[in-house]
Amino acid sequence: MGIIVQKYGGSSVSDPAKIRKVAERVMRTTKEGHSVCVVVSAMGDTTDDLLSLAKTVTPNPERRELDMLLSAGERITMALLSMAIRELGGDAISFTGSQSGIITNDVHSNARIVEVRPYRVQDELARGRVVVIAGYQGVSYRREVTTLGRGGSDTTAVAMAAALGAEWCEICSDVDGVYTTDPRVVPAARRIGTLNYEETQEMAEAGAKVLNAQAVEFAKQHDIAIYARATAGPLPGRDPSLDGTVVRKNAPRPPGTVVGVASEKDVLVLQARGEHGELLSFLDEREVCGKQLHVTGFGTGATANSGVMADGFNMVLSRENLHDEDRFRRGLTERFGDSVRLIESIGAVSVIGAGINTSYRNVRIGSAALSTAGVETRGLSTSSFRISWLLPDSAIDGAVRALHRVFIEESAQPVP
């Protein structure tokens, strides 16, 4: 049999007992004849704890030093899991991101993988060893330690699966797959058996926490099947969609079907007046990536360089990777004064599905459902696979319930 890549999230390795359970599952996989490469996250809330520790020293930690600090969490897990596998009679070796050949660009805290050179991993697999890799991290072409942003261990796993030519990549966590929405908010949420790459990527970017968007992008580029499964569940059988979620090129679903509802709280909306080129340069200098950008300008001030003036410039920013928010805010004020402002206490709720915007029907249905539920929306945006509404943080859960009810629970087209 071939190579299998398994990734275990922080909740699956949060204490020594759970690490031993993971080691037992890895051993079961090897006994089925597979070569196994394991990618691990930091234990439990270690990353959050380390980030909090940094902020007791300074409210605006430098991103390079944050990467040096936060990458330690996964290294702890990789060593402990390797020890646990050996204790069970297996042969394992642990590698950091750099030792396993994960090469990234030079962006700290939110780096992107540009190349994987898995030579040491391949050598150890050929010797019959289980290779345990610290996820979430790599090394830049300048030999700087970098981290991949929240959920980056998923990206490590899928990128390694592509580089190794793995049969599939398992993403194991405390839930048994991807659900139509967060079951803690909507108890009627259903597990989705099969998703395509685009739907999964849109759900991840819209706030769903099961899979990482960059990981799905890698899987799509290399046609890697992703199995999202429960760590406590069985190994994949003949039909992995029966007890997990399979992410692949095609999903057996009519186009236009809403497959899920995702949400994100506590985003920032950056609004600006005037020409937007300098503001975008400022965001690039600070390595701040926006989730959505909307610029309109039909006034008389259009310029040859920019095309239009930013009479309406709105960008949605996620706070998740904005570790130096205080410094960012000061820089905005010093450089742009009152021509820019950040709107807080805003969230976003989205419905996702292939072809859902071939007409305005789903926009109308969703907007009507929110209105009926008494939800005041602050903005609307669409893509080929997503409709997103901006609204107050306090209204997010109610909006999720309203949209899930009308698109999933009352839909005539069941989700597979």
Image: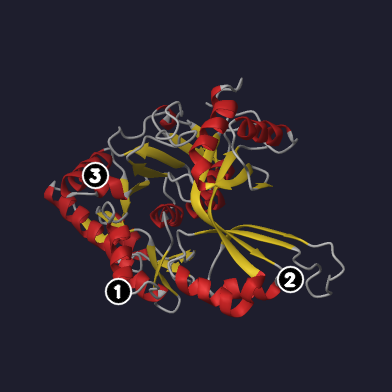
Dot placed on the residue nearer the N-terminal end, 2 or 3 = 3
Q: What number is the disc on residue 274?
A: 2
Write down the quadrant of residue 297 in the picture.
bottom right
Dot placed on the residue nearer the N-terminal end, 3 or 1 = 3
* Mark 2 or 3: the one toward you: 2
Give the side of residue 156 with respect to residue 283, left or right.
Answer: left
Which amino acid type is marked by label 2?
Gly
Which amino acid type is marked by label 3?
Val
Image x and y of residue 4, in percent:
36, 46
Image x and y of residue 382, in percent:
67, 46
Give the side of residue 118 with respect to residue 356, left or right.
Answer: left
Number of other residues with Cα within 10 Å of mark 1, as a class: few under 14, some 14 to 19, many 20 or more: few
Residue of label 3: 22
Dot placed on the residue nearer the N-terminal end, 1 or 2 = 1
Write down the quadrant of residue 20 in the picture.
top left
Which amino acid type is marked by label 1?
Val
Image position of 357 with respect to 95: above or below: above
Residue at 57%, 32% in the rendered image: 403
Residue of label 1: 57
Q: What number is the disc on residue 200?
A: none
